[in-house]
Image (tube, helix red, strand yellow):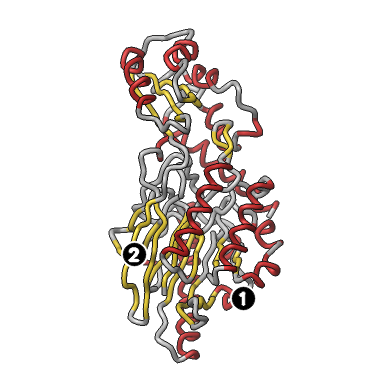
Amino acid sequence: MRILHTSDWHLGQHFIGKTRQAEHQAFIAWLVEQVGRHQADALIVAGDIFDTGAPPSYARELYNQLVVALHDAGVQLLLLGGNHDSAATLGESRPLLSYLSATVVPAVEDDPADQVRLLRRRDGQPGAIVCAVPFIRPRDVLQSQAGQSAEEKQLSLRQAIHDHYQRLYRLACARREELGLALPIVATGHLTTVGASASESVREIYVGALEAFPTSAFPPADYIALGHIHRPQKVGGLEHIRYCGSPIALSFDEAGQQKEVLLVELDGAGLRSVTPLPVPIFQPLLSLKGDLARLAEAIPAAARQADAGLPLWLEVVVRGDDYVADLPARIQQMTEGLPLEVLRIRRERGDAAAALQAQASETLGELTPYEVFARRLALEDIDDELQRGLETRYRSVVESLREGEA
């Protein structure tokens, strides 16, 4: 059984005023090509298919085009909801997509058995059993109790998620026994695990409750396909527990990462191999740091290395304590006539207002609630502990509102 594991597409994302439409179109075309080249039997998308609960029309079109392309290729598709996805949006087309070899699990099901799915090979024979776990909201698995401390709530949620995984794994084992076949068991998840290395575009999802899920709490599945962390990595050094990462860089600190899709091969004995498939760079991004003298040298050097067909999207981080009133104009002068676009200028420390000035062309519609709050918070002179506390409270409020909308 060959499975392609991917996640965190964030279809519809606007990146500092720029659409990612061309990149996502190129990625989907590349992905369909890889499915055929490696004769994959199934594709698992482990959450955050869309960037928002109300994605733009092009994002929905890409989503539907992929479903049709994989159906025509005889490949099963398993789509899991993430914390960015709206369960209602994913669920609205679920019955229709089920006729096109696509299984959608937008949220935790009322009946756990509905989350245990059989994946078939291209020849129609059973290939693997999946414990299809999407992003888990606390209300999906836990009833709040009055008087609990923050630590008690965290422990209760961790135990509830552990119990949910174990329940699904037992059901998967029972299904395997009913079929009388030696089938591997795969589990999915969209969450932060202990020790995972994140990036600035990853938003914590169990704010105020569960910060990270320990690997020891996962069931003994043959492979665990995870989403939410955008940096591809093994979890705890374990070969069978993996984040595949996002297919495109979703923030400037991801620009230097080699993005991947994972080709997972399993048989009746369990996991055989995991092969990273490097994703091409469809839009180059670069973050340059230094004082003005250093940047005057680094910016032309970066332009000389840029792809002739694509302008380089650039972030400039100015180091040094000297205040420069005309900083955006100085940077623009350095980049004039070069094949690059400066999307963001900021100081490494202090002068948060200069960074905001460089982003004046943005509108609120292009920013997430978290980005608006972070930029407002940057104007205040507060210590790190208080800042983290305010961010935690704000994110908790936003997630509560999103849950109400879902």
Q: Of the residues under marks 2 and 1, which one precedes in the sequence? A: 1
Q: In which image quadrant can residue 320 be found?
A: top left
Asked if residue 167 shows in the view, the reply is no
Q: Amino acid at mark 2?
A: Val
Residue plotted at (52% across, 53% down): 29
Q: Which mark is residue 274?
A: 2
Image coords of residue 217 (percent x, y): 39, 67
Image coords of residue 272 (percent x, y): 31, 72
Instruction: Identify the secondary structure beneath mark 1.
Output: loop
| Residue pointed to by mark 1 | 111
Residue plotted at (52% across, 43% down): 23
Image coords of residue 345 (percent x, y): 47, 22
87 lies above or below 231? below
From the viewer's side, name the closer residue of 88 and 214: 88
Q: Nearer the viewer, mark 2 or mark 1?
A: 2
Badge 1 crowding class, 10 Å Cα cut-off, few under 14, some 14 to 19, many 20 or more, is few
